[in-house]
Amino acid sequence: MDRDFDNHMGAGGTVQGANGFLTVDLAALASNYGKLRSMVAPKRVAAVVKADAYGLGAVRVSLALQAEGCKQFFVANLMEALALQPALERDVQIFVLNGLQPGSETACARAGIFPVLNSVEQLRRWSSTADDLGRTLAAVLQFDTGMSRLGVAPDERPELARCLNACGNVEVLFLMSHLASADETDSEQNCGQLAEMLRIVDEFPGFDPCIANSGGIFLGPEYHGVLVRPGIALYGGRATDAADNPMQPVVKLEVAVIQTRIVPAGTSVGYGGAHLTSAPARLATVAAGYADGLPLSLSGRGAVYYEGQRLPIVGRVSMDSTTIDITALHEGALTLGSRVEVIGPNQTLEDIARDAGTISYEILTSLGHRYARTYC
């Protein structure tokens, strides 16, 4: 078990000043990677580590996956790639999903990082950089197959083909697209996007496709292409609407109690008096709020857990604290410093996302940096 924070350690292995405790289970992460690898073998499994590995620490996560044999990593922008690259082995490939902003091509090329080219303009700029450096540069071409977000649009494909033929100094590693409804196994959009990707492969012969994100892996081998690139599944999130989530949980979050009190009926709780007690109640305030990744939308809807008991959030979630109703617990069960479960055996990422009216991705990537982090 390894702790990663700037706080000084206190007696008993606690962290001086810490009110929240985030545990990242790297063994579970590695197990999830291994499971996905066995599902798609002999195809390669990359890892999406953008947004600081979905908030869990890109360097720590990538090193753990590299130890399991992962050699391809996807980030969102060049800044993320340049920050991650020094920690990894020289033969690792890092891909920049959003492509490159004008003026950053040379830095990317000199670092040996691979852009995902999303337009004819980006291809031309990458080719021009190759001319300037006097060498061939590798990249990935992304196509829009129905999501209308990133990639070369269908009506731009003829121009891209002409440009690609003229750019003899760009090596295309593979062709890429992104599934918009991969977590919905019965969605017709999945079949439509796959069919469109196969048409693109026919139009650009000699290049392999890459279309499967986390959900795409579970759609079947026809989606696996030359490479799959899971994100949320690696981190234990649900990537498919199948009955059970086959991935191991990676994240556990506990926060500390900072005060308890007994209040009579008719007591207002939180900003704006958003909650009014209907009977005498025992309340606890815990040391995490929306600045720590607990969405304001959990106000009056979400909960935390203690020894399997659901403790509802009452009143508005504040920036640094949240009030919970602990009346269901025996008196004295929670005191100053007691820890309650926010994410763990009793409440998954999907559970808290559902209560917040959002998705697990947002919960995970919003977890703040004020938690003492433990990697195990």
Image: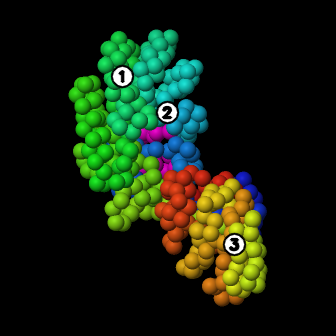
User: Does any portion of residue 333 appear in the rendered image?
Assistant: no
Residue at 53%, 49% (x, y): give it: 54
Which of the two discs, 1 and 3, labels the residue nearer the N terminus? Answer: 1
Q: Are marks 1 and 2 in contact (CB under 8 Å)?
A: no
Q: Secondary structure at mark 2?
A: loop
Amino acid identity at mark 3: His
**284 on left or right of 358:** right
Residue at 34% over, 24% down: 155
Q: Measured from the top left, where is residue 372 in percent x and y? A: 67, 59
Q: Which residue is mark 3?
A: 275
Query: In screen coordinates, is 48 left or right of 265?
Result: left
Q: Which mark lies nearer to you, 3 or 2?
A: 3
- The x and y percentages for residue 11 are 75, 69
Instruction: Reply above or below: 310 against 332.
Output: above
In which quadrant is the N terminus drawn? Answer: bottom right
- 93 or 340, nearer to the observer: 340
Mark 2 burial class by Cα count in 10 Å: few <14, some 14-19, many 20+: some
Task: Please tell me the numbered disc located at residue 156.
Answer: 1
Answer few, some or many: residues within 10 Å of disc 1's Cα (few below 14, many 20 plus, some between 14 and 19). few
Give amino acid for label 2.
Asn
Q: How many marks?
A: 3
Residue 293, image x, y percentages: 63, 57
Identify the residue at the far bottom of this view: 330
Give the residue pinned by disc 2.
98
Which disc number belongs to residue 257?
none
Which label's residue is closer to the chain start, 3 or 2? 2
Q: Secondary structure at mark 3?
A: strand
Determine the CA span between mark 1 and mark 2: 18 Å
Q: Residue at x 39, y 63 (%)?
A: 245
Q: Quadrant of residue 307?
A: bottom right
- Between 279 and 364, the residue placed more toward the observer is 279
Q: Magenta span has 350?
A: no
